[in-house]
Each structure stands twice: as structure tokens, then as C-alpha cells.
Image (cartoon, grey):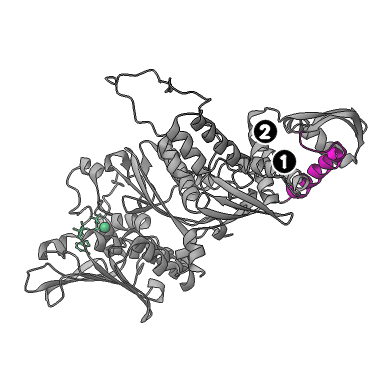
Amino acid sequence: MTDVIKLLPDHVINQIAAGEVIQRPASAVKELMENAVDAGATKIKLIIKDAGKTLIRVIDNGCGMSDTDARLCFEKHATSKIATAEDIFTITTNGFRGEALASIAAIATVELKTKMAGNEAGTLIEIEHSKFQKQEPCQCEKGTSISIKNLFFNVPARKTFLKSDQVEFRHIMEEFHRIALSHPEVEFSFFNNDEQIFNISRASLKQRIMALFGNTYDQKVVPITESTNLVNISGFIGKPEYAKKTRGEQYFFVNHRYIKNNYLHHALQSAYTELLARDSHPSYFVFFEIQPGKIDVNIHPTKTEIKFEDESMVYAILKAAVKRALGQHNVIPPMDFNMEQAFEIGPIKSTDVIRQPQIKINPDYNPFTEEAKATFKKVVSSQSSVVSQRTNYAAQESLLTTDHLPLTTIPTQFKWHEQWGKEYLVVAYGEKLLLLNQRLAWEKIFYEEASIALQKKESLPSQKELFPQTIQVSADDAGVITTLLPELKCLGFDINDFGKQTFILYGTPSGIDSGASQSLLEGIVENYKNSIESEVKNPGAGLLAKSYARKMAAKNCKLLSVEERDALLERLFQTDSPSMAPEGKKVFIEFTPDKIESWF
Ligand code: ADP
Ligand code: MG
């Protein structure tokens, strides 16, 4: 019997590996550029012809290689980046498997020129048809230049599966973006068919984003930062109003390595819930710094997927960081952030002595002295004036300094407010001036109340109808109402199915005129039906809350008294991100003192 099993020659093994690592010209671009970064280059030049099918050349000013290394680097599993398997867990370079150059040499014509700093001459190596053709000294700059021609010359199947130049070029461009973004400290240039496409200098991340995607990004993104024991997060995320219909610029980097991660993408996207119009996607450029031991980068041939030891924790941290970034930079914070710090309580140590809270009283206080009466009068009169419906600062200060009267809990953010037409309020909020759309403010308030009630399956307050109303609806509407009965009850509708498309309404959400209850219900059902067709998933609670909010808002939008405005503002600023109504509409526009000053 003859033996059938043979050892494959190395170049065949390499072709198999190449099938994984080098799938298209863009993969070769990625590997070469990553090597240049790993070599500590501060300048990297990429040159391609015919979308990389004719030529790919990468020139760097990194550390270069010795004569021996220049030859060795094309051997399979030859790498300078790890020595033992454990080293993978402390890896800080892009590469470590030592197979990219071997794979490339097996399927293309390669020319390498490299020189280390301090050496007189460099080394030139040529590889053709998977064989070393020559190695000789050469004159070259410090660093490395590798060119690849005739890619996939011996893998016809790969070659035929390549897409048009346009598509392959887009893939290369994407790789270029990823590397240029992950290393703003490096200078990059990019030539396509002799035309210079990019020449970008060393810059901050923000400048790098603008250099790659256009200056308008200056306005389109807000910074995100978070630092925890497990992970540090930094970078930029897109403002909701600039979200795109197609998934655009979405980049995660872990320790400066571009990665794909649907789970973390979900965390980010879900932090935008309700701020985005349907089917739109925010841009993001988010960097995670994490101890190399807490991730595994060795699970995928192209290393674009990695495993986190504690992925759900990273998920939660990212989501919170995105929410905070949006709150701080794009949306008015729900509370004054200076105030929020006052609530921060440090961790309690076991050695700390915990004291019982003391109530400070002034035993000598006599409310009938002239001085005390004067202070009291001053506070009361200032509180009752329209301008300081909310305690004004002067009054509060006198309370604090005199120790005479109990402190009230009236929030101080709203110094004053006025109605402007039926639709708008003008509000002095802390240092800022807000122009607020009343209808959208109500929409936001009702939406949030409804969402919470529906989620918790609790009921919003309901008011009894003086005379229960009988409502007859179309068969279609009857179907909708019947399926929504439990949810409608949560929203404050006390309603029973009487059969034959008839319902009896005993109570409605409070705050609505009795006469308006039937039209409110019909409006919600109508709205719900209209939007259900375009809603992609989970039409239930979210959509119902939106329909409810829209109708309730329409019914509440009117000229308000001072007290009603107070109540509206208080309720609005208790919601999550008060400046954003459902579907990303702005509830108000804010003017900062700087902005106002700049107008004059
Ligand atoms: P890996 O990057 O996984 O180590 P490669 O096949 O990409 O494997 O490269 C093999 C080795 O060749 C690297 O470890 C490095 O020592 C050397 N090398 C490759 N490219 C360069 C470069 N541009 N400058 C300096 N050394 C390089
Ligand atoms: Mg490499």
C-alpha cells in the first residue's frame, strides 16, 4: 500500500494562511501599515495603483530591520513581537503571529528595502514566485519600504472573486481610516494612481477626524470620557441630529486596535434611545484603554474581533458614559452639574466614625424681635413676586446667614420665565436663556411618564368620568383597543370592552377635560395605527407612549399661568435629557452668556 499522507510544502501552508489573513488588497494594506506603526514610525506613506491590484507600497520611517531580520521576516511564524505564548496577554503591538509577511510573500511579488538607524547601508530583498530572488546592500532612508505587485498571481480563485476597482478601493480607504484614526500622532499620506488623496499631519484626535471626514465634524461630535478601574474610555460621539440613515463612521478601538463589536455597538446605540429618528445611526470614534490581560486578541485571524474578560461591565460603563456625554455637551443637564457634585459621597471606610446627623438650631432665636421680622418680611415678599417665584439668591443667602428660618427645597435653577405666544416659553435657567417649545416639553414629560408606567406595569393617575361614556368604534379600531387594553389602563384609561365594537369609558388620564376624553382615546389609537406600519421592531410600548404623549401634549398646549409654567419646568427637568423630545426633536434652544455676548 502506498502512503497517501504528505507534508505540505511551506508555500502551500502559507497560501492557506493567506486565505485567512490576506483576502483582498485591503488586507495587505492593513498588515503593512500595522507593521509600520509597530515599528514606531512617525511618518507613513501609502501608495496604491488600480485599487492595489497592480501595486501596494508602504514606506515608513520606523526602526527598520537588520540584514538577517530582513530575510527572516518572510518566514512563517517569524516575529519580533512575542517570544512565548504568555506574551500574547501583554501585547501592545498590532501584530504578533508573524504570518502576514510570509503569507504575502507566498502570493505576490515583493520588494523590501530596509535600514536601521546608524547603519551605513540598507538591505534590498526581492521575492518572486514564492522564492528569494536576491538580497543585497542598497542605499535607502532609515525605515522600511515594502512593495507588493501581482497580488494573488498563483491563487486565481481569489483573483476572480475580487470586486471592481471601486469596491476594492473603498475597502482600502476603510483600512486607511481605521489606522489613521487609531494613531493621530503619526503623519500619513496616501496616493492613488499617482494622485495624492491625503496628506495629514500629526494632530489631535478631533483634528484627525476632521482631516479624514471633513471640517464639519467639528460641529457634529461631542467628547466622551470615562475612567474606571476596569477601562478608560475616550473619544468622540456624534450629536443625535447628525445621525445618518446609513451606518456611517462607527469606530471602536481597544488599546489603539480597531475592533468590531456588536454588543458594544448596542450599548452605544441604546444610550441614544429616543434621541434618534427612526433607522438612523450615530457616528462614533470611541477608544477603550484596558489592561492587555483583560482581553483576548487572539480569537480571529484578522484580529478585528477580540474578547473582553468582563464584557457586560464594559457595556454598562460605555452606555453610562455616552448618556453623560450627551447630557453634558449636547443636551442641557437634568440638574445643575455644580449642584450634583454636592451629592457625591465618598466610599465609607470601616474605620470611619459615623455620626448621627445634627440639627443646628439657634436657641437664642426670638421670632418677635424687629430684626427677625424684617428678614421674614424680606423673604416672603421676594417669594411672592413674579420674578422670583423660585427663591431668589439674595433671599436664600439671607436665610443661610441668619440661621433664622428653615430652608425651603424650592429649586433655584429657574430665575424667571415668561410665555411668548401660545407655543413658547422664555426661561432663565441658571446662567442660560432658553427658548422652549411648550408642546414638545409636554410631549417629553408625558412620554417619559407613560414609558415608565408601561414598563413597570403601574397605572398613571386616572380621573373618574362624571357619566361613563359609551364609545363605538370601527372593527379595525376595536381590534387595536382590545389588544391595548392592559396598556391603556396603565396610561390612566379606565375602560371596559362591552363587545360589538363598543367600549365603556369610566375614567381618563388626569389633567384632561372630561369632554376631550373620547377624542383623546381616538387620537391615540389613530396615531398608533399610523405609525405601526413604519415602526420596525417592538411597536408595543414605545409607540403607544409616543402616541399618548403627542395627544396629551396637544391637549395641554395653551397659555399657562405662572404656577402652571413652574410645574411644567419642574416636571420637564426631572426627565432624562430634558432638551430632547421623542424622535430627536429639540425641546428648547439654549443661549449661553458667551453666545449672547458674541452677538453684540
Ligand atoms: P508580526 O507583525 O505578527 O510580527 P509580520 O509577518 O507582519 O508579523 O512581520 C514579521 C516581523 O517583521 C515583525 O515582527 C517585525 O519584526 C518585522 N517587520 C515587519 N514589518 C516591519 C517594518 N515596517 N519595520 C520594521 N520591522 C518590520
Ligand atoms: Mg504584522
- What amino acid is labelled 1 in the image? Leu
Q: Is residue 431 magenta?
A: no
| Label 1: which secondary element | helix
**Left or right of residue 82: residue 385:** right
The numbered mark at residue 544 is 1
Q: Is residue 330 left or right of residue 357?
A: right
The residue at which mark 2 appears reads as 454
**Span shown in magenta:** 510-533
Q: Looking at the image, do the residues carrying marks 2 and 1 touch, with CB atoms under 8 Å apart?
A: yes
* Residue 249 can be seen, yes or no: no
Mark 1 neighbour class, 10 Å CA radius: few under 14, some 14 to 19, many 20 or more: many
* Front in this rendered view, residue 400 or 467: 400
Q: Amino acid at mark 2?
A: Leu
* Image coordinates for residue 346, horizontal then vertical, percent: 35, 31
* Residue count near mark 2 (Cα–Cα under 10 Å), binned few <14, some 14–19, many ≥20: many
Element at badge 2? helix
| Quadrant housing the N terminus | top left
> Which quarter holds ligand 2?
bottom left
Left or right of 466? Residue 380 is left
Predominant SS of the magenta segment: helix
From where the camera sits, is residue 233 visible?
yes
Q: Is residue 553 above or below residue 143?
A: above
Where's residue 155, x and y in %? 37, 64
Rendered residue at 54%/48% (across/down):
272
Q: Is residue 527 magenta?
A: yes
